[in-house]
Amino acid sequence: MKTNRRKFFQIAGVAGAGVISGGFSSCTQTASSQQAESNLAGIKESALASHPSVFNMSGYAAPKIETVRIGFIGLGNRGPGAVERISNIEGVQIVGLCDKDISRVAKGQKILEKHGLPKAKEYGGSEDAWKEMCESPDIDLIYICTPWSLHTPMAVYAMENDKHAATEVPAAVTVEEAWQLVETSERTKKHCMMLENCCYDFFELLTLNMARQGFFGEIVHTEGAYIHTLIDSNLSKDGYSDMWRLRENQGRNGNLYPTHGLGPVCQILNVNRGDKMDYLTSMSSFDFQMAKRAEELAAEDDFWNEFNTNNYRGNMNTTMVRTNKGKTIMIQHDVTSPRVYSRIHLVSGTEGMARKYPTPGKIAKGHSWFGEDEMKVLEEKYTPKIVKLVGDMAKKVGGHGGMDFMMDWRLIDCLRNGIPLDQDVYDAALWSVIAPLSEWSVANKSNSIEVPDFTNGAWKTNTPVDVTLSKGGTTSVRVTAEAESQLNV
């Protein structure tokens, strides 16, 4: 059997993973060649492997942290926005900024200066500078904004060094990496949260609260997607550092980015907390555009020669999941075709349904959508407390319309109050593992493949996500004078 990425990291040792794979947002990526060589049979073997549970992290309340000291890794694409958002939250100290490109660290310092915050310690200038930051005793939370292949090595190293970890999506790119996150979190009792911001978008939170209160009846079917035209970014020298995202699309054919559409509907279905995924089947179209575009670029610029292949994922992937309780989930992925952005977000129950896209979101109890006035009544009744508490501030700060800020605020509020996170390591592992499982199914004529139960049976008794803020909700935000009256929490 060929060596897969997880075993590759095991052989090299976690401490050296950053040197092997590149440090952070500006590092040269070597993962693409390993991905192209991945053994598809190994994916099924890994999906069926047994992993004993050490400790149940679902519902785990780590000790309170009055002031959460944060270190950021990766200040290229998503990192600066995260620094900006968290600079607006009380009860935190941004004490570390890390990127291989030290000029990006300097830009991060300017964000802190703008907010009147003290300078953070700087880490950078080498492939493994991030490890030094993870080893610092003066940090409670490592916030990871790097290319996909680095998320698991960095999160694991952070937890091994007594830090909570929060990582951009996906948290893992192989089945083995997903289990590595689970096992490390259970052993160290450190939180590992995937930063799935779409769980905190306004309509998604509204429908989650409606589902909790039985508005849709028994949920039967849900749909999510990531349909976002990125071909120009993926095939641009200025799109993603060292072309890392284009490399991810070479040699991998499946739903490579499932979590934005999947996370919110999993919370609605109580997956990992009352239900579990049993198996999935996946199908991809041919690639009709990426190879053609790469060929055209290579004809004019030798830089593109290594990307001039026919080994790209298909335009559209559709993956179907069946849960233990007989619910179904459809997840789609297309970042190539010229289509209007959509995450679908469809919820269908025995008494009603909702669909977000095309926007604005719609809700129905029968053959017709509710009108504008009826929607206002529903929003007034079912808007959850987190939106009422920090929703206005979230819109001011921004980050995909405010959902990023609500996600960051909730993470900090949970850590400061010593309460369970809305997203735990089992969610991070499960939502991410759809990608490699879909690769296997696509390569095997859409045969079904079992989905690992990362909770080891604890899904039967785990508590659903709390949308009422029954605990916590005490973290303040830094606000302007005109907004203070409505945002002083």
Image: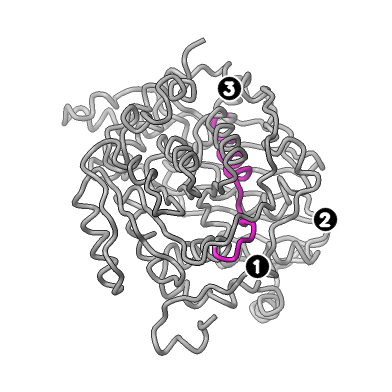
In the shown orientation, is residue 117 left or right of residue 259?
A: left
Of 378 and 485, the residue lying toward us = 485
Q: CA distance from mark 2 to mark 3?
A: 33 Å
- Residues in magenta, as a range: 416-436
Question: Can you tell which of label 2 and label 3 is closer to the viewer?
Answer: 3
Tell me which label, 1 or 2, sits earlier in the chain: 1
- Decide: few, some or many residues near mark 3? Use Cα within 10 Å; few <14, some 14-19, many ≥20: many
Q: Estimate the x, y position of residue 189 in percent, counting from the top left.
A: 60, 45
Which quadrant of the structure image shows residue 356?
bottom right
Three-letter amino acid code at the position of disc 1: Leu
Q: Which residue corresponds to the image point at 49% horizontal and 33% vertical from the top-left? A: 173
- Decide: few, some or many residues near mark 2? Use Cα within 10 Å; few <14, some 14-19, many ≥20: some
Q: Estimate the x, y position of residue 436 in percent, counting from the top left.
A: 55, 29
Three-letter amino acid code at the position of disc 2: Glu
On screen, residue 13 above or below 101: above
Which quadrant of the structure image shows residue 241?
top left
On screen, residue 489 above or below 469: below
> Which residue lies under the disc numbered 3?
43
> Which residue lies under the disc numbered 1?
206
- Decide: few, some or many residues near mark 1? Use Cα within 10 Å; few <14, some 14-19, many ≥20: many
Tell me which label, 3 or 1, sits earlier in the chain: 3
Q: Is residue 431 magenta?
A: yes
On screen, residue 284 above or below 79: above
> Which residue lies under the disc numbered 2?
218
Q: Is residue 13 magenta?
A: no
